[in-house]
Image: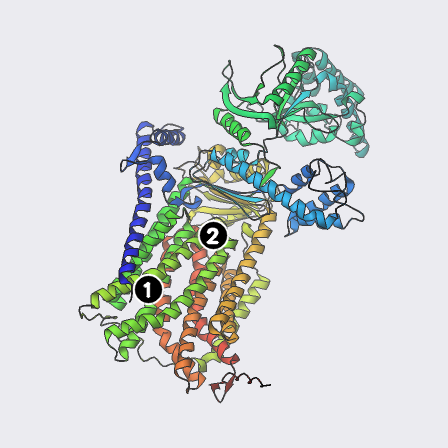
């Protein structure tokens, strides 16, 4: 081998860099271990809030040493943390969300809030199509808009407006405007991405990951170590649309509320023939009470309403007192308390009644009763507050003094700074400063409010945070505050959001995963166990089979693993549990390369060549097979990386890095050791006395058995196909949408009983519970509330889970403890949850199909280019289809039998692509040997050539399959419940792939190849050009 010195230097440098890069990880682990020890010593383990106190103590310790030297005299903890090997959510715990920026909101903003009927119709139709469609929202909008006769995007009422001045002209056609709108949308998406990045930077999570997912308006955000999901959701989904509005006094709108109540009482009575009409005396009494509330003191009004509605009306938690007929007074009877007539609060209601009340008040017929001075009134709700006495959230109703344009007199764009602060009373607030323009408008607004004795509402994202009166005169200088029952953390988050700027449109969480830290620690433990056991078994096997040469392969393998971890740390890639599986699978790939080399060396030695020549020829002859096999696997991993997200990308990343490092270590590092040992004339055995004659002189007529193999394969394929069509597959929520919760119980539980319980009509209607790992842990999936991704739906589902499952929990476990996944030492309750909206589920399915078929096309083309005969490509693809169909069939047949998770999710798609890669790897090795034999044995019959070529690869095929299976079985057994289904797919794929490379791919290639008298037909010579 030439350039040994250069290779040696490169290997040493690469190893030193890897060790240096991994040192940061060891440093941070030690420092964080010290922090945990410190926290444990100062916190009483018996304290009720011990877990929270330990978290705070640990954070305080780490913050205190963040800038202090922890290694080498120049490395601080903060520096080391920045450079450490990043762990994914499944290993560290944390939160993963995919946000969908509302394209609809962006279009409305670009159209300056247009009410044009064509524009609004197209938006409504796009809303319906996006629910079940695969295209982008903008594409659907364009299709629907262009379907409307005469509709022009360039209309002055749509996009030819001040907002789009200089971009869109009235005379432009729809086709000319479309690309300009796309460019503008993309600019807004980039703006949204930057706003979210700034918010996350202020969140305090180390090593966050944020990336745009194409141009669809989707943004992936991973926050390893984050624990408070509600806080994260609030920070990410808040548009930070800050507005300041004048508000009406309650006395100014009370009469309208009474008239609206009367209108709806009469309408509901007319629709309900069996109901008694509202008693006029009772309605009059309610109306009088509200009018009194607008004129007298608030306490008298509360007493009056309480007398009318009954004492239980304001204390019944369910709000469904039998004495109250809500149809008789649909608005007034739902009031918990009227507001002070001179104040801005009209009344207080249950938070759950918000949509109903505003629906009543905003009805077109009702609003027609508004006096002229109130025609632009806009009803808004205050911040919901949990009333401990009532047991539910309550909120106040306000009447905003809006205008025809619906634009606030003062917006958040004028804010130059925001910070958490305290009032004189000690209340937590957010203080803000404005620019000169904002300060002038603010002074004018406060002057008017002071003179009229009215209030100004501070509105954030359509929620009234406060509506203070201006009692001390106009406010100059542009200073203001937001108050609203904040904690210090709430106020800091809000200040950070305001400083980062507002989102250009609303953002909705369409996929969410929360993994508790305790589950992450278990994943690390199981991942390391599987990794260690797999590595040990392979090391022992290689020495057993190949003797000293196997030992050198083992050294190269260890160096390979060092390179992989060093590369991951250097590239700041994220290590996930599937990523660990990818590294362990790389062990099999690395071993395969060495097996190919050693088997070729053994063949050369058997021909009587010298050891030096055998080593040289063995490496050279094996190189083609190694490259072809690994390139096909690399291509499938690359496609997986492109179409995958999160942990799946982690798997693809480690697999690609592992393939590259495996090639280097197997081809060069192993060669250095072998050449170094033999340079002094030492004889190196490539076998042991036990394995010396294994698979020697194999001569099997494989093609003679191909018809039997065809029949066997056909039977398995038919069984699989029938099962897939009749029984289908157990699609996970990745592809169907819904929610999944991993719940751990105090005692073993019966999954069937839990499924039946949760599937009751008054619970979820449909749910599935399966044992997940140990018999006291279940994975519970449901599509209940699939279209609702907001906090209210999530809370409803968690309430139902707790109500039905608390019988299996410790007696002292309350609701808060049951749902909180943030505790490091959590033992029971919800350990993790995963949520996927229906739209992204469709997109995940589509992307997965693209990935599978895309990989097949790419590999078909690669093999066609390398082997220059389409028959080789056809055989390889036939084998892959065969393997994939059988894996799918096994999962279809057994998903309701086997005691572990066999859902079809993104991880399963990763497994299928890996199966494709392995099957092709095996097939390419066989094809490469056939190609070699064809060139060497030109006088042989083609069948004899093929059989001899397959026979010569049997030792390599079985050796590689065995070592790979050893690795996969180790992960399957010790790697944890979350990847057992993933590993089973790979195990089946390896078994079937080994079979298909010999009995499917090769026979299909043989049967489609043109032959004459058993021999390949030579290529027809090109006709000579005629001379002129």
User: Residue 900, position in %: x, y?
Assistant: 45, 54
Residue drawn at x 37%, y 51% as measured from the top left = 567
Tell me, yes or no, if residue 159 can be seen here: yes
Residue 648's tag is: 2
Instruction: From the image, state whether disc 2 or disc 1 is nearer to you.
Output: 1
User: Residue 988, position in %: x, y?
Assistant: 44, 64
Residue 269 in the figure: left or right of residue 443: right
Q: Quadrant of the N terminus?
A: bottom left
Tell me, yes or no, if residue 966 can be seen here: no
State the SS at label 2.
helix
**972 vs 26: above or below:** below
Q: Earlier in the sequence, mark 2 or mark 1?
A: 2
Residue drawn at x 25%, y 80% as measured from the top left = 608
Residue located beneath label 1 in the image = 667
Residue 382 in the figure: left or right of residue 981: right
Q: Quadrant of the C terminus?
A: bottom right
**266 vs 842: above or below:** above
User: Residue 138, position in %: x, y?
Assistant: 66, 47
**965 vs 158: above or below:** below
């Amino acid at each position: 081998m030439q350039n040994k010195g250069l290779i040696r230097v490169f290997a040493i440098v690469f190893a030193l860099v890897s060790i240096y890069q991994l040192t940061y990880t060891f440093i941070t682990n030690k420092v964080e271990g010290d922090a945990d020890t410190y926290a444990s010593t100062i916190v009483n383990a018996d304290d009720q809030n011990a877990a929270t106190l330990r978290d705070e103590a640990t954070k305080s310790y780490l913050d205190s040493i963040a800038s202090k030297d922890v290694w080498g005299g120049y490395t601080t903890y903060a520096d080391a943390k920045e450079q450490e090997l990043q762990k994914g959510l499944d290993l560290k715990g944390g939160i993963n969300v995919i946000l969908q920026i509302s394209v609809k909101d962006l279009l409305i903003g670009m159209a300056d809030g247009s009410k044009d009927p064509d524009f609004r119709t197209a938006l409504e139709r796009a809303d319906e199509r996006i629910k079940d469609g695969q295209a982008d929202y903008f594409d659907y909008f364009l299709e629907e808009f262009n379907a409307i006769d005469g509709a022009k995007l360039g209309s002055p009422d749509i996009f030819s407006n001040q907002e789009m001045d200089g971009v869109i002209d009235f005379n432009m056609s729809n086709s000319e405007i479309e690309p300009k709108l796309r460019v503008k949308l993309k600019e807004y998406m980039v703006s949204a991405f930057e706003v979210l990045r700034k918010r996350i930077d202020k969140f305090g999570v180390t090593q966050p990951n944020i990336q745009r997912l194409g141009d669809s308006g989707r943004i992936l955000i991973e926050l390893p170590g984050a624990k408070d999901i509600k806080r994260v959701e609030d920070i990410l989904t808040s548009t930070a649309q800050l507005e300041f509005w004048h508000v009406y006094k309650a006395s100014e709108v009370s009469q309208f509320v009474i008239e609206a109540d009367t209108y709806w009482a009469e309408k509901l009575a007319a629709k309900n023939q069996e109901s008694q009409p509202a008693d006029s005396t009772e309605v009059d009494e309610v109306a009088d009470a509200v009018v009194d509330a607008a004129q007298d003191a608030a306490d008298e009004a509360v007493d009056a309403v309480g007398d009318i509605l009954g004492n239980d009306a304001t204390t019944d938690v369910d709000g469904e007192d039998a004495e109250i007929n809500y149809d008789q007074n649909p608005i007034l009877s739902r009031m918990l308390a009227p507001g002070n007539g001179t104040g801005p609060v009209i009344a207080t209601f249950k938070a759950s009644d918000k949509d109903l009340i505003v629906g009543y008040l905003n009805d077109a017929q009702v609003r027609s009763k508004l006096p002229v001075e109130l025609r632009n009134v806009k009803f808004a709700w205050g911040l919901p507050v949990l009333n401990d006495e009532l047991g539910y959230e309550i909120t106040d109703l306000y009447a905003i003094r809006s205008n025809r344009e619906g634009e606030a007199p003062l917006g958040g764009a004028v804010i130059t700074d925001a910070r958490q602060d305290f009032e004189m009373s000690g209340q937590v607030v957010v203080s803000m400063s404005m620019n000169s323009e904002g300060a002038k408008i603010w002074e004018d607004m406060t002057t008017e409010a002071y003179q009229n004795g009215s209030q100004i509402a501070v509105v954030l994202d359509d929620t009234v945070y406060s509506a203070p009166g201006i009692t001390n005169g106009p406010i100059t200088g542009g200073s203001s505050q937001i108050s609203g029952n904040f904690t210090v953390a709430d106020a800091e988050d809000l200040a950070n959001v305001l400083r980062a700027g507002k989102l250009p449109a609303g953002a909705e969480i369409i996929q969410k995963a929360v993994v508790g830290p305790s589950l992450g620690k278990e994943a690390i433990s199981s991942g390391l166990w599987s990794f260690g056991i797999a590595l040990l078994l392979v090391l022992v096997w290689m020495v057993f089979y190949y003797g000293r040469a196997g030992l050198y392969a083992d050294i190269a393998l260890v160096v390979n693993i060092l390179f992989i971890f060093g590369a991951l740390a250097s590239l700041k890639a994220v290590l996930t549990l599937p990523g660990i599986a990818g590294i362990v699978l790389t062990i099999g790939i690395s071993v395969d390369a060495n097996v190919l080399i050693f088997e070729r060396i053994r063949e050369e030695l058997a021909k009587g060549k010298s050891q030096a020549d055998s080593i040289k020829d063995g490496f050279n002859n094996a190189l083609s097979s190694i490259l072809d096999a690994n390139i096909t696997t690399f291509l499938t991993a690359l496609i997986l990386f492109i179409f995958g997200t999160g942990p799946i990308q982690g798997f693809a990343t480690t697999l690609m890095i592992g393939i590259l490092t495996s090639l280097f270590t197997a081809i060069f590092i192993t060669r250095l050791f072998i050449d170094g040992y033999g340079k002094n004339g030492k004889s190196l055995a490539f076998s042991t006395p036990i394995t010396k004659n294994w698979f020697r002189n194999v001569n099997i007529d494989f093609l003679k058995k191909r018809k039997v193999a065809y029949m066997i394969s056909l039977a398995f394929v038919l069984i699989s196909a029938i099962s897939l069509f009749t029984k289908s597959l157990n699609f996970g929520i990745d592809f169907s949408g819904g929610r999944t919760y991993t719940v751990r119980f105090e005692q073993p539980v019966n999954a069937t009983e839990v499924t039946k319980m949760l599937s009751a009509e008054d619970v979820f209607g449909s749910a599935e519970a399966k044992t997940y790992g140990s018999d006291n842990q279940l994975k519970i999936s449901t599509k209940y509330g699939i279209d609702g991704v907001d906090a209210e739906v999530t809370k409803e589902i968690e309430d139902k889970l707790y109500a039905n499952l608390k019988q299996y929990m410790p007696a002292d476990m309350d609701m808060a403890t049951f749902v909180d996944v943030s505790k490091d030492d959590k033992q029971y309750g919800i350990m993790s949850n995963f949520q996927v909206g229906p739209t992204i589920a469709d997109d995940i399915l589509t992307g997965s199909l693209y990935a599978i078929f895309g990989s097949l096309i790419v590999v078909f083309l690669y093999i066609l280019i390398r082997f220059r005969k389409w028959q080789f490509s056809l055989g390889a693809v036939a084998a892959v289809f065969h393997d994939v169909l059988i894996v799918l069939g096994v999962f279809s047949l057994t998903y309701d039998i086997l005691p572990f998770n066999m859902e079809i999710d993104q991880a399963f798609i990763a497994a299928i692509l890996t199966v494709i890669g392995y099957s092709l790897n095996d097939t390419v090795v066989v094809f490469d040997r056939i190609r070699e034999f064809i060139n060497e044995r030109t006088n042989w019959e083609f069948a004899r050539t093929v059989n001899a070529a397959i026979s010569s690869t049997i030792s390599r095929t079985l050796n590689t399959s065995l070592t790979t299976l050893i690795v996969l079985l180790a992960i399957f057994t010790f790697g944890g419940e979350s990847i057992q289904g993933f590993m089973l797919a790979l195990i089946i794929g390896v078994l079937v792939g080994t079979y298909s490379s010999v009995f499917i791919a090769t026979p299909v290639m043989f049967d489609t190849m043109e032959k004459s008298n058993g021999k390949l037909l030579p290529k027809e010579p090109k006709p000579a050009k005629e001379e002129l």
